[in-house]
Image (cartoon, rainbow, N blue to C red):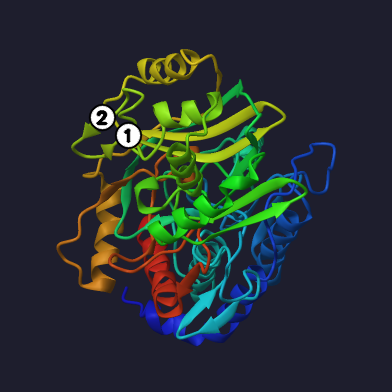
Amino acid sequence: MSIDFRKEVEKRKEAILKDLTEIIQINSELTTFDEKRVNAPFGEGIDEALTFMLNLGKRDGFNTLNAEHYAGHIEYGNQEEYVGMIGHLDVVPAGSGWSYPPYGAVIADGKMYGRGTEDDKGPTIAAYYAMKILKDLDLPLSKRIKLILGTDEETAWRGVKYYFNQYPEQPVAGFIPDSDFPLTYAEKGILRVVVRGKADDSVLHSFEAGLRDNMVPDQAKAVLNNVELEKKYLEFLEKRNLEGSAVVNDGKLELEINGISAHGSTPQLGVNAAYLLVHFFNEVGISNAFIDAINTYLLDDPVGKKLGVDFVEKEMGSVTINAGVFNFNQGKFEIVLNPRYPHGVDYDAFIDKISRGFESLGAQVEIGKHQKLLYVDPNSEMIQKLMGVYKKYTNDVEAKPMTTGGGTFARAMKNSVAFGPHFPGKPTYIHQKNEYIILEDFFLSIAIYAEALFELAK
């Protein structure tokens, strides 16, 4: 059976674009998590996005389920086995400095700008329309297709954990539209590590940087009790060609500095604003236990050499450590780290070295959320089918399945891998200001997803 899925996408472009615009315009950042807030445990914005997607499913005649506002699904068919997909509707904080409103869904130069366009509301819409095309065409399938809707992927995965606890059935095959093409068959293990301690605040009054541990901080602020350092700070900015400011206010010196954000899986691609301020402190001789901890174990070291956990594996690459959140106030500090490790790392030894390092400086270490690494045989039938579809639509005949430091819901569901939507060689701004999706690529991904679902479910 030969179907022109590109043409099917073309027929629906106007409707697709309308639905994409509307969901991007929903601010679905996590506010607070409160299980007592029964209709919106992750906040009103996330629940609005979940309701929007479920309403699309109802509109188009799918079976839908709202899992007590923690997650949901849209389902086609009633066969026993199913092919699964998971998209997530939450987004990281928009941050500042956007050229277009982060929730404006502005289209310019063939791109739609907005938080969530590529990570992951846009791809979730793509997956939805891929499933809708199969339904519209009434193609013969041997398996159900289910699109699961996640709600707090960027934080603690409580939504999908709740969903699979209540509805534990697993797919025979599946993919997650939240990564890169051609396909990702292995994902590093991911940790959340919180370092806490006390430090002298006689010179450094306060310090803050970062919004999430899985983002490189693009802005840092500090308040000093020494106003005489204003000139030296401005000279520091000029000498290093950095953006920032210094303001004397109520007898204190308020410093700001801008870095460059990046995804927490690739800290080497960003410029950590907190580290820039620490470089200034080092130049002028400001030190305390908070600054010492950064200098000793973190500063300009995205691969964990200072902690003694650096390791490189031939398939999955190196250990990375992103220091994503910094707070110091009233003599107490907290640093939130996002370490990621490849296959071959001894997990217990890894966390022991991190803990012992900071504890040697008198800090306390809390090991939080742990997402174990994912590895699926790249020679499996499912991966070969997905790779075949990708090659058909791109003519990228030399493409090879990949590994990543990123973490997707592929590790939340059995028999699944991350599959698109980002195409090789294209820029990406996920977790950064001016996030966008190239509309031509977005529509192509729908055709790829439609044929991939057909191949897996026919």
Quadrant containing the C terminus in the rendered view: bottom left
Residue 389 locus on image (x, y percent) = 29, 65
Q: Residues within 10 Å of mark 1 (few under 14, many from 20)?
A: many
Give the camera-side residue of 62 and 427: 427
Q: Which mark is residue 117?
A: none
Instruction: Single out the residue that lies furthest toward the front.
Output: 228
Tell me, yes or no, if residue 368 can be seen here. Answer: no
Residue at the spot x=63%, y=36% of the render? 327
* The quadrant where residue 240 appears: bottom left
Quadrant containing the N terminus in the rendered view: bottom left
| Callout 2 touching callout 1 (CB < 8 Å) | yes
Disc 1 on helix, strand or loop? loop
Instruction: Single out the residue that lies furthest toward the left.
Output: 398
* The quadrant where residue 316 appears: top left
From the image, tell me which residue sits under label 2.
Answer: 311
Residue 24 locus on image (x, y percent) = 63, 69
Q: Is residue 191 left or right of residue 188?
A: right
Q: Is residue 92 left or right of residue 31?
A: left
Residue at the spot x=41%, y=80% of the render? 440
Give the camera-side residue of 302 and 3: 302
Residue 66 locus on image (x, y percent) = 72, 50
Q: Residues within 10 Å of mark 2 (few under 14, many from 20)?
A: some
Q: Is residue 202 above or below residue 184?
A: above
What's the amino acid at mark 2?
Phe
The Cα–Cα distance between marks 2 and 1, rounded to whole angstroms, is 6 Å
Q: Is residue 182 above or below residue 328?
A: below
Considering only order in the chain, which callout, 1 or 2, is on the residue closer to the N terminus? 2
Residue 187 locus on image (x, y percent) = 36, 40
Q: Is residue 8 above or below residue 190?
A: below
Q: Which mark is residue 319?
A: 1
Q: Is residue 65 left or right of residue 291?
A: right
